[in-house]
Image: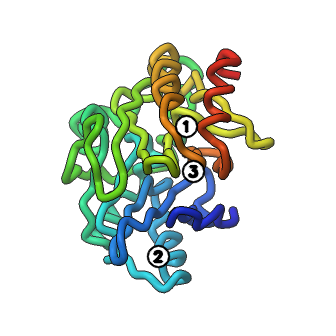
Amino acid sequence: MAQATTQYGIHQIPDMGFSNAYLVEADQQSLVLIDTGTPGKDAKVLAYLTSIGRKLSDISYIVLTHADADHSGSAAELRRLTGAKLAIGELDAPRISGEKKLKEASGFGGLLIGVFGAFTKVERVKPDMTLKDGETIGPLTIVYTPGHTDGSISVYKPNEAIFVGDLLRTDGSGNLKLAMASMSRDMAEVKRSVEKLSKLEFSMLLPGHGKPIEHDASKNLRDFVDNGFT
Ligand SMILES: [Zn+2]
């Protein structure tokens, strides 16, 4: 996947495969990494940093939008390599630390996790910080947006961008879709969280899966909500 953009100091890390990870320039020196992909993706992060003349130790924070293995998979390794502080929403923290199961889902979602789990061994890691609604990391504000998981968060760069994790995704045509129901804990809560984000202003929306929306994204999201989440 090609790099999406460097608008607003936001970079999509290329070649991450199934799930997206982003870098945000927090100030002159430090970078914030949002999500880490599946296990073994640390080399992709390093390759991209090198290509823009940066190094692993420039990452001061790693923020996980939620605990799922396709977002937290390389967190332990990248925390070691960067020395960054690892942060995640309060209620997803026990899932990456190993105090709770990484994911619980029933039906088809549970089956998928079972199959996925057989192929991936996610190293458990204790986060350095747990995040609540309204907390800030540099220029970024945490918005608590549960539903896909109990502790899912979005990361807001006011008036510029929102990183939504798996609360929303985009399809092949770039249209918004809700979190995948079979992989989510509570779809009514997903919808309430999407409504909460639709009150904010941003021009880019950066999902955990699918292409980012690069312009007029908050208007796009309001239309999506007004159309009954389609
Ligand atoms: Zn995901």
Q: Position of residue 216 (x, y in %)?
A: 66, 44
Q: Position of residue 11 (x, y in %)?
A: 54, 65
> For residue 46, which numbered disc appears in the image?
2
Q: In the rendered view, would you say 37 is above or below 40? A: above
The answer to whether residue 184 of the structure is visible from this angle is yes
Q: Position of residue 156 (x, y in %)?
A: 43, 45
Q: Are marks 3 and 1 in contact (CB under 8 Å)?
A: no
Three-letter amino acid code of the residue under disc 3: Ser
Asked which quadrant contains residue 107, the reply is top right
Structural distance between the alpha carbons of marks 2 and 3 = 17 Å
Identify the residue at horizontal 64%, vertical 35% (top origin): 219
Asked which quadrant contains residue 16, the reply is bottom right
Three-letter amino acid code of the residue under disc 2: Leu
Q: Position of residue 183 (x, y in %)?
A: 53, 27
Q: Are marks 2 and 3 in contact (CB under 8 Å)?
A: no
Neighbour class for label 2 at 10 Å: few (<14), some, many (≥20)?
Answer: some
Q: Residue 212 or 134: which is nearer the viewer?
A: 134
Three-letter amino acid code of the residue under disc 1: Val
Label 3: which secondary element: loop
Neighbour class for label 1 at 10 Å: few (<14), some, many (≥20)?
Answer: few
Q: In the rendered view, would you say 24 is above or below 212? A: below
Structural distance between the alpha carbons of marks 3 and 1 = 17 Å
The mark that comes first in sequence, 2 or 1, is 2
Identify the residue at horizontal 69%, vertical 62% (top origin): 1
> For residue 115, which numbered disc appears in the image?
1
Per the image, the residue denoted by label 3 is: 19
Task: Give the label, 2 or 1, closer to the camera.
Answer: 2
Image quadrant holding the C terminus, namely: top right
Neighbour class for label 3 at 10 Å: few (<14), some, many (≥20)?
Answer: some
Label 1: which secondary element: helix
